[in-house]
Image (cartoon, rainbow, N blue to C red):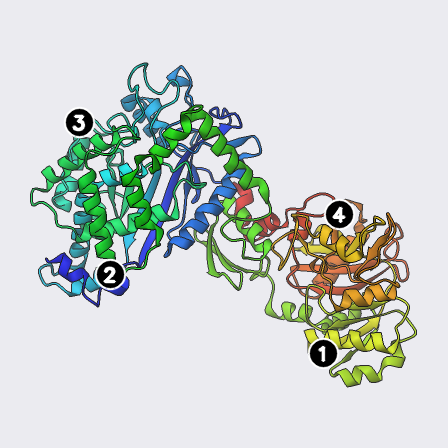
Amino acid sequence: MDMKKMLVNDRVKPYLLKARYGIEKEGQRVDLSGNLAKTDHPKSISIRDEHPYIQRDFSETQMELITPVTETLEELFNYLAAIHDVAYRSMGDNEMLWPLSMPPQLPEKEEDIVIAKFKSVENVLYRQSLSNSYGRRKQMISGVHFNFEFSDELIQSLFNLQSEIKDYQHFKTEIYLKVTRNYLRYRWLVTYFYGASPSSEKNFFEEGSLNEPVRSIRSSKYGYTNSDDVRVSYSSIRNYISDLSLMVKRGLLIEEKEFYSAIRLRGGHQVSDLEEHGVSYVELRNIDLNPFETYGISYEQAEFLHLFLIYLLWKDEDNHCDEWVEMGDFYNDAVALEHPLEPTQFAVEAHHMVDEMEQLVKTLDLTISDSLFVNLREMLRDPSKTLAGRLCKESEESSQAHVATCIAKENYKKSWEKPYQLTGFTDMELSTQILMFDAIQQGIRVEILDRQDQFLKLQLKDHIEYVKNGNMTSKDTYVSTLIMENKTVTKKILQQHGFRVPIGEEFHTIEQALRSYDLFSAKPFVVKPKTTNYGLGISIFKEGANYEDYQKAIILAFKEDSSVLIEEFLNGTEYRFFVLDDKVYAVLLRIPANVKGDGKHTIEELVTQKNRDSLRGRDHRTPLESIQLGELENLMLKGQGYRMDSIPKAGEIIYLRENSNISTGGDSIDVTDEIPDDYKKIAVDAVAALGAKISGIDLIIANKEAPAANKDAYGIIEANFNPSMYMHIYPYKGKSRRLTMHIIHYLFPELLQN
């Protein structure tokens, strides 16, 4: 096959950068001083043996983070970032992840390195066998495994251009075998650029085993390698399988998965499955942790690896494939053990390969980052720019352990900076981010079906649930959602069931509403859109209103909906009850948007100051919303005799809104434990009357100490079919109520049985 000719074919080019990716990233848990953690794997990470995202590798302290398979590098790094957030916040506030492949200082006695405490006896015995064969110290080395699969469209289009191999699966396997042989031959280039384990810490080696820094201990003969007797041929898939089987029979390997190679052929559960099913993808296993990247690998590295694999598919190989691979072993060990600040002895060949790769990019019309080849050439020109070179230079003034601890602390700080966010998905609505966090932590697979629409697929084994906007689920009927969306229908149903609701009228045109001014002008009333959420377009007049203000309120409400409600204003305090499956899980007192005067600053300046709080932001991506200064706020200030440039007295509270929605800049205060059970029962019964399972229901309570059965003790002003949860989870004041976890347990009750 003339692979070079096939790759430049116009029918192949569109698919060259299409692929599927996955990352498995290992790292040691350490305390805030950089010492190996003495704690067990975090208890908050459930189903710990089979967790799809966060597992243990060899030791109890060695955490392995696993991304799902993704179609793009952007999505891959989004998941990697999110899983890191979950891992960090599950470990708690006294631990962090070590950023180096080489472990921190190990215990003096090897038996004090704790093997992972799996429930499965088989898993523990396998690790015990590895310990006996290789020692526990070498098992503590960590790294990144990069899983890569060429798109089926690419392989199919290549298959269609040739006639030598008739079977598609056989052809696909041959593609991966060629790439594998070339990867083993040229992996030294990856070791040069991205090797990052120059030195070891105390108690890894016996004294004097390796005195000078190198490019990569992990990728060298001093890293985790099989014995020299373990030899496997890559000439064909049959030879590969039979050789591995022979190694196990001879007792050189405990089982096939013990075979350690810089690249592994994957497909099926057992290596023997490769013969029947073919190779599905390859796993690159020789990648050191990049200490200068929060997640252990950079986007540019992943981009390089994809391009490198295309290049290896294009590049010719020697006919004597086993000798070809052996030559690669020699080259790689030589590069791995070079001083990280010295040029590589294979610099001429490295320059040539980079030139070839760049030419290939032009020939195949590939789109890659502008900086990639600039950075590769810079690293060849100046070895101190390589990862090992940088780490070596930075360690000169102190020590590698000190540098690593400082980096780990920076990563730790970043992960706790905004604990309400899920990095990688911060463009999504906050309740959805928190639900995703909890799902990942609980070992539920999360697939984003529509990112903009906040639509998720959650899967635990064979159990699948679909969730939109954090708590819209199959548990609520479509009609119950429609009922709660329509304020008029909600009111009528609640009234028919004996609940007190505000009296009012519905209007379909501005003119019709304006003609009814005299019905409402002299008494307290509320103007609000019929169906919208988040408190948009609501105006409250506690002492009536003049015609001009009434007209403004009507126009604002009609901007949000085609129908408007005007209702009596109920006196009392407004509370939001979060009801889930016939139980109140949280009650919130919401204080309208406000500022506190200091006698020096204008209202506008005070708003700017309050909005600087890191908890405040826009579009439901933070626990509190920024206070706005629009028409409604100006209307509210005017009613109090203020303007934006007014300077309130010290200690004076100025309210900028009547409605208390958090979405319009209000403050949230948890009062769940202060609300009597009879009011909670009102909320539960009202939601049941609407036929709903999940609802945020708003009650006005005149005096919460008075019995709910008293005349006019309460009024129900609204029921919300998609209530915000983040304001209960991160209240401005009071106890956090983790509603997203209650949603997950409601959808997946089997989690509570584990």
Q: Position of residue 523 (x, y in %)?
A: 91, 72
Look at mark 3 in the image and give the residue it sits on.
Answer: 228
> For numbered disc 2, what is the local secondary structure?
helix
Residue density around tag 2, few if under 14, some if 14–19, many if 20 or more, within 10 Å: some
Please tell me which of labels 4 and 1 falls first in the chain: 1
Q: Position of residue 271 (x, y in %)?
A: 23, 42
Look at mark 1 in the image and give the residue it sits on.
Answer: 563
Between the C-alphas of marks 4 and 3, the distance is: 66 Å
Between the C-alphas of marks 3 and 1, the distance is: 80 Å
Q: Nearer the viewer, mark 4 or mark 1?
A: 1
Task: Please say if 192 is above or below 716.
Answer: above
Q: Position of residue 117 (x, y in %)?
A: 43, 29
Task: Please say if 605 is above or below 407.
Answer: below
Residue 53, visible in the rendered structure: yes
Look at mark 2 in the image and give the residue it sits on.
Answer: 154
Tell me the residue at 70%/48% (across/down): 731
Question: CB of mark 3 within 8 Å of CB of mark 2?
Answer: no
Between the C-alphas of marks 4 and 1, the distance is: 34 Å
Question: CB of mark 2 within 8 Å of CB of mark 4?
Answer: no
Q: Which residue is at the front of the view, 93 or 131?
A: 93
- Give the numbered dot on residue 672: 4
* Direction front: furthest residue: 381
Identify which amino acid the numbered label 4 is placed on.
Thr
Q: Nearer the viewer, mark 4 or mark 3?
A: 3
> For numbered disc 1, what is the local secondary structure?
loop
Please tell me which of labels 3 and 1 falls first in the chain: 3
Q: Position of residue 31 (x, y in %)?
A: 52, 27
Residue 58, visible in the rendered structure: no
Tell me the residue at 20%/30% (across/down): 334
